[in-house]
Image (cartoon, rainbow, N blue to C red):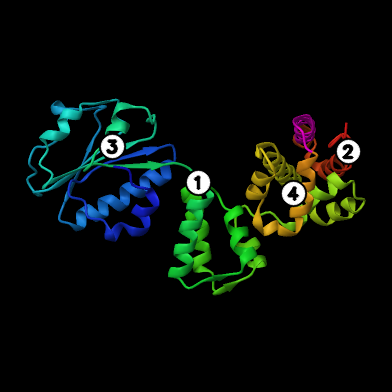
Amino acid sequence: MKINPEKIILESKDFHFKKKIFLISGNEETLIKKIQHILIQKIRNEGFGEIQKNISKKISFDNNNLNDSLFFKSKIILYENPKEVDQKYFDTINYTNTAIIICHTNLANSSRIKKYFDTHKEFFSISCYKLSRNIKKIFLDFFLNQHKIQLENDCYWFFLDNTSNHYQLFENEITKLINYDKKKIIIGDLRLLLSNSDSEEIDNLFFLMLEKNTEIIKQAHQTINSSSDSYLILQRIKFFLGLLYSAKNIDEAIETFPKYLFKYKKKFLSIFEKTNTKKIAGALALIKKTELLLRKHSSMHQPISERFLLNKEFWKTK
């Protein structure tokens, strides 16, 4: 049967597994390791002692590691990325004293073993992939409530939109939030806390650029202090171009646009209505050229960035 990883992380104390056999699969390795660690701790708390790591690439009767231990009556057997699985093997196991955890980072959803665990009534299948925005929201809500931390609405969405979709990186940012010495946090605090947060000034450059606004040079002087800032601006512009490209209609554009940037929402939707793939392709090509220039002449980051921001070819209307 399928179990969502967030349930294991947040509600593991409430789970009682009659048969302790788990398949943890997906491409998010840090999340797989997290789930594995939680399950091992939970199973050991129930009296299972020894951990046996089976390095065989085949799960079958020939390598089942079910010999009685000299020290423990119960054992946990770990398999990592097995290539072959004999499903009949699972019917031979005494689950009162044996737990099995199979971790697989290259398992297709269409594979026989994945389907077997997904549909089994007593075995457990846990799929670990990059965190969606909704899953991040579940984690954030849980920890805010648990630690009695207050976030204003703009801060809340800023945190979700400016943290990684990789579990470990997201957890690191949650930990920073928990350990911060203020219970009521404002958006300025988050900009300092988060590893990948982008300043409002950088976001604003994208909109000034498309509006051909002369204020852009003044803003650029205030924002660009190093070649790293120049790269950050280009990455942020690519982020907005990605939103424009991926949205199929106005409703999707509204849904995907970062909620903490609410004051730019009307501008973004106006841009979306005039967007086409040719404009986006041209803009991305210009960004690529600018990145190459910055690599060759990093000390010239200021004039290179300003030339890019003023380039009339960036968002041609025809």
- Residue 40 location, x and y as percent? 26, 50
| Residue 133: image location, x then y, percent | 54, 50
Q: Which residues are magenta?
A: 275-291
For marks 3 and 2, the one nearer the N-term is 3
Q: Quadrant of residue 300?
A: top right
Mark pair 3, 2: CA separation: 56 Å
CB within 8 Å, label 3 to label 2: no
How far apart are the two marked residues, 4 and 2, measured between alpha carbons? 18 Å
State how far apart marks 3 and 1 are (Cα): 27 Å
Q: Specify the label residue 311 is tagged with.
A: 2
Q: Residue at x 36, y 54 (%)?
A: 7
Q: Is residue 162 visible?
A: no
Residue named by callout 1: 166
Relative placement, left or right, of 28 versus 14 is: right
Q: Amino acid at mark 4?
A: Asp
Instruction: Give the residue number, with chain letter if any, for mark 3.
Output: 119
* Magenta span contains residue 38: no
User: N-terminal of the two: label 2 or label 1?
Assistant: 1
Question: Which mark is first along the chain, 1 or 4?
Answer: 1
Q: Amino acid at mark 1?
A: His
Q: Marks 4/1: CA distance?
A: 24 Å
What amino acid is found at the position of numbered circle 3 in the picture?
Thr
